[in-house]
Image (tube, helix red, strand yellow):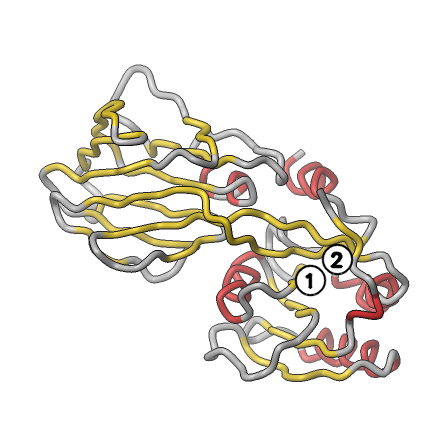
Amino acid sequence: MAERMDPREVRCVGIVAKPGVSEGYLERLVAALEKRGVEISEVRPAGEPDGKTDPDLVFVLGGDGTMLRATRMFPGQVLLGINLGKVGFMSGMLPDEIEAGVEKVFGGGLEVQQYRMLEVHVASEGARLAANDAVLIKKRPHQLISVDVRLGGEELFAFRCDGFIAATPLGSTAYALSAGGPIISGDAGCYVLVPIAPHALVSRPLVLGEEQVAELELVGREALLSLDGEEPREIPAGGRVEIKLSRESVKIGRTEDWSWWRAVRRTFL
């Protein structure tokens, strides 16, 4: 469920800007915030190392890719995206509404939804988090990979395919949707496992509960693993990837005119 953010809690903000973003948008945002007397702790291009400040709210100038990078730059902070990308599903306001959007934020019109993240384990490494998805995909374009899938330690099926996508409800609207997965309500406590181009007559995405652990084991060939579109890492043949829903969440802010289902309607229908 979305919660209203108390504007009195927003005393210090940060700004993450997509490289090459028009200076005009940044100048308009800064001017609107200064008019409100808000401290701007830092302005950083997406992808730069984490800053030392702890803002109450982070404005993100860019598309969904910039939003995902911002989740890693400011973990646990409320992110409010201004859509300058092609899809902008994670965004909370449009670029033409910067001034009006800032006024809504400080007028009590910002709703914050927490979306559960994925927890991904590889071998003996520590857990890594993904806000959108974890994608296990073949390394070579002309070859399939074989993947054994277990749920809760019980063998379910084996697929020869291009790979698998594990996606959060937030990520169900991204790559997983393109691969035939369902759109899951943002407040659902589940995640989805979607095969990519399976070499099988029958295959269906799986919607898994918050306590279920999916284990993907590579048989015969190596593959690549990418979290939220980051640079992929190689998983060797015989390697295993364990995935479950994390207790951690990413916090996405939207103005009162930019709800979850309105975002679905505007983006996909």
Among numbered discs 2 and 1, the one appearing first in the sequence: 1
Q: Secondary structure at mark 1?
A: strand
* Image position of 264 (left or right of 10): left
Q: Residue 266 appears at what percent x and percent y?
A: 71, 41
* Rendering quarter of residue 232: bottom left
Where is mark 1, residue-wise?
Answer: 80
Picture quarter with the N terminus: top right
The residue positioned 40% from the left and 40% from the top of the image is 166
Residue located at (53% from left, 63% from top): 71
Rendered residue at 41%/26% (across/down): 205
Q: Mark 2 falls on what kind of element?
A: loop
- Structural crowding at the residue carrying mark 1, measured as other residues with C-alpha within 10 Å and reported as few (<14), some (14–19) or many (≥20): many
Viewer-proximal residue, 205 or 86? 205
Residue lying furthest left:
220
Q: Residue furthest top?
A: 201
In x, y percent, where is residue 181?
47, 30
Rendered residue at 25%/38% (across/down):
216
Q: CA distance from mark 2 to mark 1?
A: 8 Å
Q: Give the residue at mark 2.
A: 93
Quadrant of the image for the C terminus?
top right
Q: Position of residue 74 (x, y in %)?
A: 55, 70
